[in-house]
Image: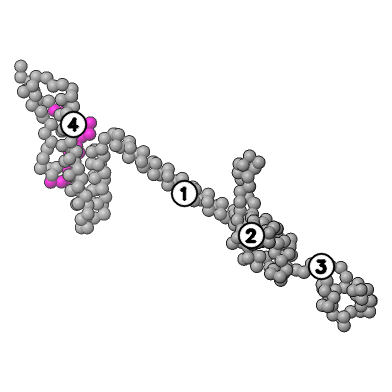
Amino acid sequence: MKTKPFALVYDTPVDTQTTTDSEKKEAVDVDVDITKKEQFTQAEVNEIVAKERRKVEAKTKQTISELEALRANSNLTLIEKENLTKRIADLSTQVTTKEQQAQTEIEKWQKKYEKDVKAEKERAAAWETRYQDSLIHTELTSAAAQEKAFSTEQILRLLKADAKAVEEIDADGKPTGKFAVKVKMASKGADGKPVTVEFTPLEALKNMKDNHEQWGNLFEAPSKGGLGLNGSSNPTSVDIKNMSMDQYIKFRGNSK
């Protein structure tokens, strides 16, 4: 009995609307003469299909390369280049398996996810930095006012670079979401040696205020009772010539 040739059918057909010379020159021969063999095993059929598929894929890839070279031609119009780009994309889809297409889609969404996560982290970091800067500014300003510093701006210039907002930890060692400002300052340890200590803003200002020799000019002098000039505790700074008799008598009594 004479059998008829059969045509192999592919689930990924080649686009018959050809535009290149190689597509016009050759047609894929999918007719297989099976007259020499009465029966094919499934494995043999699969091998024939795979072989023909490889031919189709090779030819499609060649077509893609030709189209890409053509697209690089600077003499083409924008519309012509867009059409070629669409054609290349369509052909590229034909030579990829469903698994490859799925993997490509996964990778695309993975990249988008990673990009979104990175952008969100950058936004969160920016807002945290703004919050911490605002907290540091507020705490230092408040401490400067409490310790009667002459210039808040001067205090900020001196201390802000060494200040940071630190997240507080609860008794279990877990972050609380609350931040406290700490200021690093040079100080002296119990042995009298210089050490770096972290103070609260108010502690830092008190420490500066107590160091009259280095920072005394930044703060108002402490006000004391009596008749010293402008509240000064130093009797030698009193201008006696401008005192009334009653003030002079009281001054003399306090200085004894």
What residue appears at the point 46 percent right and 45 percent down from the top-left corner?
Answer: 117
> Quick one: SS at disc 4?
helix
Callout 3–callout 1 Cβ contact below 8 Å: no
Q: CA distance from mark 3 to mark 4?
A: 99 Å
Reply yes or no: does residue 14 show up in magenta. Answer: yes
Q: Quadrant of residue 94?
A: top left
Callout 4–callout 2 Cβ contact below 8 Å: no
Q: CA distance from mark 3 to mark 1?
A: 55 Å
What residue appears at the point 63 percent right and 39 percent down from the top-left corner?
Answer: 172
Q: Which mark is residue 119?
A: 1
- Choose the circle earlier in sequence order: 3 or 1: 1
Please report the bounds of the magenta region as a residue range: 7-21
- Choose the circle earlier in sequence order: 2 or 1: 1
**Above or below, 237 relative to 76:** below
**Residue of label 3:** 223
**Residue of label 4:** 50
What residue appears at the point 30 percent right and 37 percent down from the top-left corner?
Answer: 101
Quarter of the rendering occupied by the C terminus = bottom right
> Where residue 190 appears, x then y in whole percent?
69, 57
Callout 2 environment at 10 Å: few (<14), some (14 to 19), or many (20+)?
few
- Choose the circle earlier in sequence order: 3 or 4: 4
Q: Which amino acid is tagged 4?
A: Ala
What residue appears at the point 64 percent right and 57 percent down from the top-left corner?
Answer: 197
> Where residue 214 appears, x then y in whole percent?
69, 69
Q: Quadrant of residue 234?
A: bottom right
Q: Locate residue 256 relative to residue 139 in the image: left or right.
A: right
> Quick one: SS at disc 1?
helix
- Choose the circle earlier in sequence order: 4 or 2: 4
> Quick one: SS at disc 3?
loop
